[in-house]
Image (cartoon, rainbow, N blue to C red):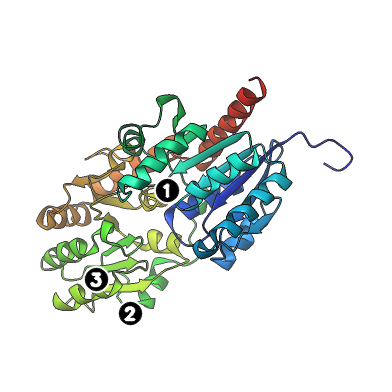
Amino acid sequence: MKGDIDKRIRVCMVMPKLQVGGAEVQVLNLIRKIDRSRFALSLCLFNGGHAEMERTAAENVESVFFLDFRWRRFPVSFFRLVRHLRRGRFDVVHAHLAPADLVGRAAAWTAGVPVRMTTEHGKGLWKSPARLLVERILNGITDARICVSRDIMEIRRAREHTPEDKLVYIPNAVDPEQFGRPARGRDAVMAEFGWPAGDPLVLSVGRLVKEKDYPLLVEAFTAMASKLPGARCIIAGDGDRMDEIRAVVKKNGMADRIALPGTRNDVPDLLSAADLFVLSSEREGLPVSLLEAMAAGTAIVTTDVGGVGEVVMGGESALLVMHGDASALASAMERVLTDAVLRQKLINNASRAVKERFSMNNAAAELGDLYELLVAKKENG
């Protein structure tokens, strides 16, 4: 826009760092899709993270600012952020994830940024009474809290006393174009793990944390494997429960049938190769991995927790089971793997739903409309 007055809305997204995780991938994909003719988007990261994700972000924003945030140097970090926001003359600060949603809103208010908002990616049930009090205070300087699932919205309303008119529902989304065209075929994926190409393959993708309850998946897969001796399983991801999960796999004698390869950058390939995607979580917001499986055309079995029911319909686009019941999870997995007609029905319905209701293009358009609405409200008093 050289030679012209840049009338685009200036937005600064603030977050801790870019790393392989559902919320971070959501932000990166939104950055790719936001209309750059309407918005001048910048990114502020508290610290460095995944270099490739940072390079991708830099190609799609005006600038990337690294704050070098340290709690032990909080006053210095805070006022450095305030100075950056003032110099940027931003119209909107949009914060994601703790502690950026906490510090970012306070800094934006101090810097005089007109619109201050967050996206609520998780339930936040870990918040202490003191933190809940802080959230209630911050409600007064927050213009919108975007919730990626309706149960998260209810928690923000009931537990954190957020006014109804500040709660906005924009669900997590995926870009279907990123799936369905794998770089590697099934044979290559199975060969990597030393498995016959024709063996049934179960896949789960996510952080190896308590909430995902991968020990439940291991127990269910073990039970199912007695009936489907050729079945294999990949649990892709990393986290603080890796050793625990590996121990359960070993205890159950499944070391040659369940692979724990850590974080992967080829999830579309894995999804395309898999016969079944399984989510065994005890708690979820609206899981991005579930949307990715839908977009990739992989049949799904999942626990019925959090926002899962907003995404899939039991018996139509996925099989749903109650969390904690390894026998029910095993039975559902076996049913999908052995019934090709059911499997194709689930795939067709899920693929249609993700394109119609959870497209990243739609999410970016809704977010852009919200930016414009909130800025206009501030300009008009």
Question: Residue drawn at (37%, 68%), measured in percent from left and top?
Answer: 238
**Crowd tier of the residue under label 2, counting other residues whose Cα lies within 10 Å: few below 14, some 14–19, many 20 or above:** few
What secondary structure is found at the residue carrying circle 1? helix
Residue type at tag 2: Gly
**Camera-nearest residue between 258 and 48:** 48
Residue type at tag 1: Ala
Work out which quarter of the rendered image holds the N terminus and state it: top right
Residue type at tag 3: Ile
Question: Residue drawn at (64%, 42%), measured in percent from left and top?
Answer: 111
Q: Which mark is residue 194?
A: 2
Mark 1 and mark 3 in contact? Answer it, CB < 8 Å: no
Q: CA distance from mark 3 to mark 2?
A: 21 Å
Residue to which mark 1 is pinned: 295
**Of discs 3 and 2, which sits in the foreground?**
3
Q: Earlier in the sequence, mark 1 or mark 3?
A: 3
218 left or right of 79? Answer: left
Q: CA distance from mark 2 to mark 1?
A: 27 Å
Work out which quarter of the rendered image holds the C terminus and state it: top right
Q: Is residue 336 visible?
A: yes
